[in-house]
Each structure stands twice: as structure tokens, then as C-alpha cells.
Image (cartoon, grey):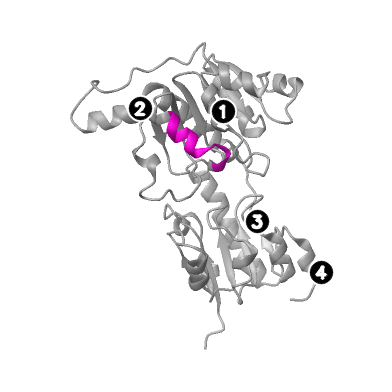
Amino acid sequence: MSNRSRVAVLDDWQGVARGAADWSRLEARADVVFFADAFADEDDAVARLADFDIVLSMRERTKLPASLINRLPKLRMLGMTGARNLSLDTAACTARGIPVCNTQGGGYSDSATAELALGLLIAAARGLAVGDERIRAGGFQMGVPVGIGLAGKTMGIVGLGRLGSYMATYCKALRMNVIAWSQNLTPEKAEAAGARYVPKDELMTTADAISIHMVLSDRSRGLIGAGDIARMKPGAILINTSRGPIIDETALLNAVHAGKIIAALDVYDHEPLPPDHPLRSAPNTVLTPHLGYCIKETWDTFYPQMVENALAFLDGKPVRVTNPAVLQTER
């Protein structure tokens, strides 16, 4: 029986992993298997990963709770991309002495998600998806919704951290008025980012477009509820490039079907979005398949560091370890 390590590279949804890094040094020492499709459920993940001792995961695509980690008896090292992964139970890894190694960003790739939010804003405001569909079907302007100009309109930003601040800058360049709210935001912090602080109810009521830039947590789950959506202006645009569960999905579906708002979404409660999901046929929507961070510059950082992490572990010298307590124990 071979003593070679086995490395699983998870959720390569765009088929970019192999071309984004030089895997040859790792493949000389281990069997590397790329998984392009999401696992059907936890049992499927267990069945397909049980024979691997290194798992390299992509952000939060495959959930890695303790119940899964503890069913992978051969697992010795887990890699993740990005600085944090809220769907990974790091404590469960630590308890088993499994180092968790992350990747670190660089350059300008950190603005990719905010850039997509800007693209979704413009696409929703000008009916770009419908225009593209009509012209490919042999038509022209007929059936394309009349767009709205953004200059002079009000952008409401929920969450004014790094990405929200980028979005504020973009919208100011479009000559929009920018208002912002989050639980911890102060008027001074808002002003420093080029926005004006307002209470949540005022933001939901007065904004012509709203963009969500929050980390998913117990406090932000369901943050934009049915009452908030009901307060939005008729025809307002709701953009979400953060995480699906921040918005009440049922209330959002009701609002787009009623023609009350336009939803521009890159993230969903369940990903990949199920084939029969009602959002796929919903009117007044612009949908992208969680492309926020998915740019060449990101892959050119993530995947080479994944390879480095795996090689360092095989050399007995793990790097970028997020749970350093495991390094104090003998493996």
C-alpha cells in the first residue's frame, strides 16, 4: 500500500485551481485530487474525503463543522483560504491536533467584492441583464426596463468597514449622496468614510439603493427583515455581496414578485443555489454566482499559498497556522 499523502482541493467551482499555481512539487509527494462540485451533504463529504489526510478548502463553500471533521479519521492538516472561515470549527481541529493553515491577501484584490457591488448597482439601475438577453434574442430596446440615473440619488450602506468604505468612495464618484448605518457605526467614523450616519429606519426609508457589507454572525443573521424591506422606497435597489442569510429571503422574494424593489444578489442562503430555487425565475432581480472575491488576482494569491501550506506541513514545519496551540503538542 502506498504511503503517499492524499490532498483534496475542495470546491473548485470555476475550474481555476490547477492553472492558478504550480502543483508539481506537491504532486511529486502526494496524490492531489481537485473537487469541482459541491458535496451533496455531510455524508457525501465524509464518503469522498475519508481517505485524505490533507484537505484544502475554499473559503466557506464546504461547511466544516466538528461533526464532519471528527468523521475524517485520516485528516492531519486543514487549509483554508482567507483570514477566517466562520463555517470551520477550528476548535474541533485543535482538539485533534490538526493545524489549520490560512492564506493571506495582498495588493488590490481586497476591493474585488466592493467592485462587484458597484457593478450590480449599475446593472440593476440600468436593466443591463435584460438588455443583454433581449439583444441576444434578436430584439433591441423593447422590453428593457427604463433605467434610473444614479447621480443625485441616495446610497445606503449597511456596514461601513473596509468593503463598505470602498463602496462609499465609488458611489461618491457617481455623485450619489451616501448614508450609512451599522450597530457599531458612529457619526465620526461615517464621516471619515465619506458618508453620513443615519439610524437604520431612516436608511431603509430614504435610500434609493442599499448595499450590504456585513460579516455574517448571530447579530447580523436576518438583519434586513420583512419590516425593513417593507420600508424601502418603491423601485429601490437592494444589493447583497456579503452573505445570503443577512436578508430575510422570503420577504425579499415577496418584494421582487410584487415589483416593490429590485434585488441585485451575489450571495444566497444555500450555495450553490439549488436548480429549482425560486430566485432563479424571480422578476426584478440581477443574480451572480458568488463572484465577489473570484478574480484572477485572488486565485494567484490563494492557490500558491495553499501549495506552500501543504508542503510546509509535509516538511513538519507548518506555516500560517491559525491555531498555534497544536504546534505545542506532538503529532
Which mark is first along the chain, 2 or 4? 2
Q: Residue at x 60, y 53 (%)?
A: 81
Vertically, is 300 above or below 228?
Answer: below
State left or right for residue 183 relative to residue 278. right
In terms of secondary structure, where does tag 2 sit? helix
In terms of secondary structure, where does tag 3 sit? loop
Residues at marks 3 and 1 touching, judged by CB atoms closer than 8 Å = no
Q: Which mark, residue 227?
A: 1
- Badge 4 local density, few (<14 within 10 Å), some, or many (20+)? few
State left or right for residue 286 relative to residue 54. left
Vertically, is 59 above or below 251?
Answer: below
Which mark is first along the chain, 2 or 3? 3
Which mark is first along the chain, 4 or 1? 1
**Magenta span contains residue 253:** yes
Furthest residue in direction top, as rendered: 152
Vertically, is 323 above or below 276?
Answer: below
C-alpha span from label 4 to label 2: 55 Å
- Badge 2 local density, few (<14 within 10 Å), some, or many (20+)? some
- Identify residue for label 2: 128
Query: Is any atom of residue 311 visible in this view?
Result: no
- Identify residue for label 3: 102
Q: Name the kind of residue labelled 3 in the image.
A: Asn
Furthest residue in direction right, as rendered: 328
- Badge 3 local density, few (<14 within 10 Å), some, or many (20+)? many
Which mark is first along the chain, 1 or 2? 2
In the rendering, at what x and y percent does residue 322 appear?
72, 57
Q: Name the kind of residue labelled 1 in the image.
A: Gly
Q: Which mark, residue 328?
A: 4
Residues at marks 1 and 4 touching, judged by CB atoms closer than 8 Å = no
In the rendering, at what x and y percent does residue 260 appear?
43, 23
Q: Which residues are magenta?
A: 245-255
Q: Name the kind of residue labelled 4 in the image.
A: Gln
